[in-house]
Image: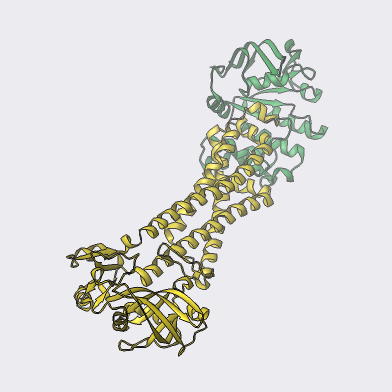
Chain colours: A green, B yellow
Amino acid sequence: MEVAKLTDVTRVYKIGEVETRALNGVSITIGDGEFTSLVGPSGSGKTTLLQLIGCLDQPTSGKVIIDGKETTNLNRNQRANLRKGTIGFVFQFFALIPTLTAYENVEMPLLLNGKNSTERKQRVLELLKAVDMSERAHHRPDQLSGGQQQRVAVARALATNPKLILADEPTANLDTENGEQVMEIMKRLNKETGTTFVFATHDPRVIKYATRVVTLRDGVIEKDNHTPAK
Amino acid sequence: MMNYFKMAYRNLGRHRRRSVLSGLALAMGTALLMFVAAFFQGEMRSSLETTLRLNTGHIQVRDADYDPDKLSVAWDYLIENPDQVAAQIETLDQVQAATPRLLASGIVSVRDDSSGVEIMGVDPASSANDPYRHLVSGDFVTADDREGIVIGYPLAESLGLKVGGQLTLLINTSDGNVDEQVFTVRGIFTTGSTAYDKGIVLLPLAKAQAFSGAENHASMIFVLLKDREQAEAVAAAMPSQNFQVKTWRELNSLLVLINDFSNAYITFINLIVLGVTATVIINTLLMSVFERTREIGILTAIGMKGRQIITLFLAEASLLALGGVTFGSLAGWALSAYFAKVGIYFGDLGISQGMILDDRIYPYLTLDSAINLIVTAFIITVLASLYPARLASRMEPVEALHGAK
């Protein structure tokens, strides 16, 4: 079963008169339960591909199907709805809402999905426990270390039980220990819940966890192979 | 919804000084407008009350041919047997007092100083003349006094007169001539309006009639009602043959117009001041949107819709409005209440088109105008936030996540 299917996708950015072809006719299918790394040098198109899979952006041409739904013609709100229920995000910068506590950050997607307070509480506590952040549930982001913030971000990404988690350079701002910790958690959750993970990274620490590595260069897929999980 | 307000509250707390200053701008605007509204209402209210009390009454009954601008005492323009007419009017239930008055023009002179005045013959016993009984010194004239006169404090000052002092009064008589007589100042009054007090002198009606040659005539029957809103109904019930019956609304049409105009004027000022305040709020929220671009991107990425982002910013504006308007209303109310007690002294504001202004204005805040202002300020603030809120809601997630505009 495929979670995402991109067919002949091109994304051109235009800044003034200059056109940049970030992706050039990319086709890729992400299967259910995969733990995939998108690798490649800066400017190869990893982040753009991730954003298109995440419905944060729309392709200039080509087709993007997420969880069986064609997304190319969806409007802003329809895309927000699709993201809300199907996709979770982990960003390179520790993308938590600074005014909310760890608990409230994880709770936010559940609120947006209209879950009641009992369901929310149960799920948030469960997730914070899963990422080993129960003790710091009521701390705000500025009271947490980078690694802790990223673990909260992982918990938030998983809050609504999405089919797909997209992570853009999730360990780029973390030291080795914290980076490993975050990856271990994600790998464990991938195994336990069957959630599909796709990373954009050039961190070898992340790549070694991947079951599939897709290499991009100059907006095209250069290599796509499977790496056994460790 | 509570969660939006919780987030909004915390967001405002991020830049506490900026939020407080924005709230303060709104508070100052609201306080200022509330005070201005109270000031205008106080001015209009006291002007109307003073004008009715001193000048026009609630109803005037006059001879059909009487022209108030000429102050003529020719018999053709006057009411005959005014005491009878007044007594007849006073039998009406709604009437508090009805009294004849004779008005003539004259000149007061003391040695080399002189001043043009309106001479008013009054029945000293009538309660309608109570406003003239606020005496700075001396006593009010009695009905049978043939040499006594009561004058206003500013006139006494300008002519250097004291109680017991003498003045020469020149009067235009009913046959078109002039006559003069020396009178003794019995009392010096103050009504609270310098402009009015320096232009009027009071004689007992009988003396004024004899002096002017009006004999058993008066310029008008001055009528005060228990409730001035009854004026039209009472006027309709009055004898109208050979008389003109005028209500206070007809007699003060300009004042009524100015009153209406002042309401429009206040609305206009409200819109200007609140417009300026709104730009402060827009500015605050715009800065907030630009600073939180990435955060908006995150919220959008996790599935927050445009409508929900708008709600978040509207909640921030509502909290700012709630704080600012509440604080401003309390300050405006306190300011109005204080000056309503002590008044604001303006001195001689003059008389314009029969509109008499007191020397001291007492702001008067009505519940209606306070609520009107509070609701308007709140709505304008929230409306002002729509622009930044919409801007935030329309950000493309990718651009927002990269911190771009």
Which residue occupies 47% across, 75% down?
A: B115
Q: Would you identify the image quadrant in which residue B184 lies?
A: bottom left
Which image quadrant: the C terminus of chain B?
A: top right
The foreground one among A23 and A163 is A23
Q: Is residue A135 above or below residue B388?
A: below
**Frontmost residue, A58 versus A122:** A58
Residue B172, position as x, y percentages in the image: 35, 74
Residue lying at the far front in this picture: please name it: B177
Q: Percent from the top left, x then y, of residue A8? A: 64, 9
Above-or-below relation of A126 to B15 = above
Residue B356: x and y, percent? Answer: 43, 67
Q: Is residue A191 visible?
A: no
State the residue lying farthest toward the right.
A176
Q: Quadrant of residue B183?
A: bottom left
Position of A170 compared to A196: left or right? right
Q: Residue at x 76, y 12 (%)?
A: A218
Give left or right: position of B205 versus B313: left
State the residue in front, A182 or B296: B296
Q: Residue at x 43, y 83 (%)?
A: B168
Q: Is residue B369 above or below residue A21?
A: below
Residue B264 picture location, percent across and down: 44, 51
